[in-house]
Image (tube, rainbow, N blue to C red):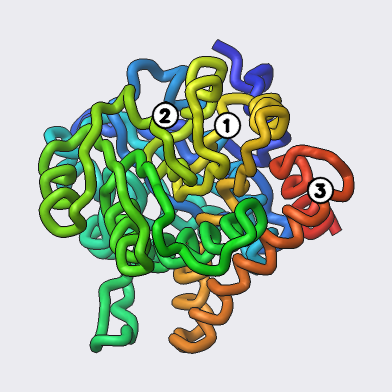
Amino acid sequence: MSVFSQRDFADHEQVVFVSDDKSGLKAIIAVHNSNLGPALGGCRMWPYASEEEAIRDVLRLSRGMTYKSAMANLKLGGGKSVIIGNPRTQKTPELLAAFARALEQLNGRYIAAEDSGTSVADMKYMAQFTRHVAGIVDKPAADGTRSGDPSPATAYGTFIGIQAAVKERLGRDSLEGLRVALQGVGNVGFDLARQLKEAGASLWVTDIHRDSLTRAAKELDATVVAPDEIFGLDVDVFAPCALGAILNDTTIPQLKASIVAGAANNQLAEARHGLELMKRGILYAPDYVINAGGIIDVYHERIGFDRAALLKHIEGIRENLMEVFERAREEERPTGEVADTIAEERFRR
């Protein structure tokens, strides 16, 4: 297959294919843009159905990181990596070491952090073999310290973003009584659900992992539904917090929510689906704007961590989204298009 003719090959600066026979490593590293700084983005491990699917995912994700960092006003470029394999059965120390050595060969053009299928512990292990991993430093928290895991920051930023979307679309400052359907209650999704519950929202959840659903039902009094039921629920907010491309020709007509706002990356299967949401009167919070808390957290780790400065930066997601919503209203354009325009104004200077 051709990489250059891929629809998602959006002027990427570098795409590296990595393999190691001894460990079984098969991985792809993509650097989309480094105008604002070194490319930083998560390392995802997933049992992709095909190599083509993995290539498309890493290209879309790395491009999204360029736009995410620019919208969050970070001096970082956009990159991402994917390891092809099941993280629950195929991840080994040998495989992680092989991937880390491949990172080191890029001399800092790309910096990896934890993502779906990888963990802070994995990044700390990889740090034995490369200098170019992030999100591994323990940080001050309200109740003491927390690990370098950026997922709490992602969840908090997404919660702030939902507040902004509710204000814009429903004219409400309070989330009391808000009905929210969450697709995915892993690290980020569960923490987001907890914050929504504490704010008075009612929750419906689904996930591919039964233990995650059991925890959400027990600890948050969430209603568990089947994966294919989550789209059509009569709720105020649909919050995608799993994998991408879930807003498409099949799912959009099912939506009854007036807001789509969640932590997942690349929620639109195609750019045109943003227009479809707008036509249906559904407010879409562009994913890379609302879920930027994690990359903000990692950035602050690199420049010298200060918790107050971090929280202030994450809470700036509210203003970023309100700017997007306002321009979208005035220009009668999909919010995703408007966000792209603002990001491009920043990273193409």
Which mark, by number, is residue 202?
Answer: none
The first of marks 3 and 2 along the sequence is: 2
Residue at image mark 3: 329
Residue appearing at x 50%, y 16% in the figure:
250
**Residue 316 % position (x, y):** 62, 72
The first of marks 1 and 3 along the sequence is: 1
Residue at image mark 2: 231
* Residue type, label 3: Arg
Residue appearing at x 74%, y 54% in the figure:
324
Q: What element carries label 1?
A: loop
Label 3 with label 2: CB-CB less than 8 Å: no
Viewer-closest of 61 and 321: 321
Is there any visible trace of residue 38 in the rendered image? no
Q: In this view, does 199 lie to the left or right of 267?
A: left
Residue at image mark 1: 268
Viewer-closest of 159 and 203: 203
Tell me where residue 38 sits by quadrant: bottom right
**Residue 110 % position (x, y):** 52, 53
Quadrant of the frame with the C terminus: bottom right
* Residue type, label 1: Leu
Quadrant of the frame with the N terminus: top right
Q: What element carries label 2?
A: helix
As measured in the structure, the alpha-carbon distance from the residue carrying label 1 to the one carrying label 2 is 14 Å
The first of marks 1 and 2 along the sequence is: 2
**Residue 113 % position (x, y):** 39, 57
Residue appearing at x 46%, y 34% in the figure:
244
Residue appearing at x 36%, y 58% in the figure:
201
